[in-house]
Image (tube, rainbow, N blue to C red):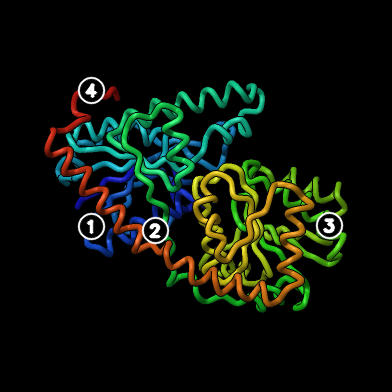
Amino acid sequence: MRVLMITDVYFPRINGVSTSIQIFREELRRNGHQVTLVAPEYASETSDEEDIIRIPSRRVLFDPEDRLMSGRKILSMIPLLRKQHFDLVHIQTPFIAHHVGVRLARELKIPCTETYHTFFEEYLFHYVPFVPKNWMRALARHFTQKQCNAVDSVIVPSTAMRDILQKYGVRKPVQIIPTGLELEKLSACNGVLFRENYKIDAGRPVLVHIGRVAFEKNIGFLLSMLRELRKKVPDVLLIIAGEGPALCTLRKQVSRYGLGQNVLFVGYLSREDTLLDCYCAGNAFVFASRTETQGLVLLEAMALGLPVVSTAVMGTRDILEPQRGAIIAQEDPVQFSGCVLRILENEFLAKRLGKEAREYVREWSAPIMVERLIEYYERLIAVDSAIGPSLSGNVSG
């Protein structure tokens, strides 16, 4: 197959969407399929993989980490893209990529699918604070329904996200295909070295949170939990790895709670360098996001044998409900801290959870998930061939 992917975000911008795209592209190519990715050009230099088309872009208002691609530039490439005989368009994000992706599918007369990665209803109001929350939520629902109904079918990473889209009134087929783990890249780590480099005592109890430092990740709740946990474990340390717009607010919360000796912000860590070591430096991984459509970091922690304590909200439910390698906690500081305390005080429990976690994540491997994606692509192409190009005349660009 020849797949044309288009996205508003990709590396060097670090987030779950970039990671998901990269994992699926690599696995598709290992299976003999060609994947061309249209993505923004960033200010910093990039060492690109094969078959990436970078589009001139500009900064996004209120979110300087992201870029707005030139839709006109992409559309000018239609004659060149037509010569490559793509079988389908796969849209990864709902902004310029969506509108241009639908137009490309119509012009190339091929089917179009879109992955819904982000739960915008609980996301947008953090970045447009001067608009009432209920207005932003209503806008997000309308925006999502309209876009999902404009493509042939939709991919989501979790059951919860499928249910929400159907509740919104999305009528197109919705397929659940989570992002898989590249387990071969999640094996070697050195937690001892990480502790030494950051001057963390070998016996100190350490919790780890890795991810974008954004308001929707609910890291502020983890600080409230830590304040409770410190009553029982005075020397406990929470490592927060990542960068993002909530960093200043969280630093102020740490100061207000008097947690300066119990929280370590380490910023962005490279996967090729110290990220995996950071995971393995911990006694447990803690997470409390309310908006995850999947929660890849939970699976990464488990793959490295790190017990997880997390709330099970939205997409994280699919990962956590079997309670293999993880303890599900409530969004209550006392109850959550009690779950963490069980792991810190019970070495047998911690080892059992770590062993369970490593075994469990095999079910979430990238080869397994890409098989599901390939089967989905093949069905989509077959249906389109049988009934004719569905986007060729009835979808506005």
One can see residue 57 in this view: yes
Q: SS of the residue at dot 1?
A: loop
- Circle 2: residue type: Ile
- Circle 1: residue type: His
Residue at image coords 60%, 62%: 326
Mark 3 and mark 4: Cα distance apart in space: 58 Å
The residue at which mark 2 appears reads as: 23
Where the C terminus falls, by quadrant? Answer: top left
The residue at which mark 4 appears reads as: 394
Marks 4 and 1: which is nearer the front?
4
Mark 4 and mark 2: Cα distance apart in space: 33 Å
> With respect to residue 125, does 247 lie above or below?
below
Q: SS of the residue at dot 2?
A: helix
> With respect to residue 385, does 303 lie above or below?
below
225 or 30: nearer the viewer: 225
Q: Earlier in the sequence, mark 2 or mark 3?
A: 2
Q: Earlier in the sequence, mark 4 or mark 1?
A: 1
Q: Marks 2 and 4: in contact by CB < 8 Å?
A: no
Residue at image coords 55%, 58%: 297
Determine which of the numbered discs, if any, sits on residue 330 in the image.
Answer: none
Q: Earlier in the sequence, mark 3 or mark 1?
A: 1
177 or 75: nearer the viewer: 177
Marks 3 and 4: which is nearer the front?
4
Mark 1 and mark 2: Cα distance apart in space: 14 Å
- Circle 4: residue type: Asn
Q: Position of residue 83 (x, y in %)?
A: 14, 43
Q: Earlier in the sequence, mark 4 or mark 2?
A: 2
Residue at image coords 59%, 33%: 62
96 or 341: nearer the viewer: 341
Q: Residues within 10 Å of mark 2 (few under 14, many from 20)?
A: some
Q: Earlier in the sequence, mark 3 or mark 4?
A: 3
The residue at which mark 3 appears reads as: 260
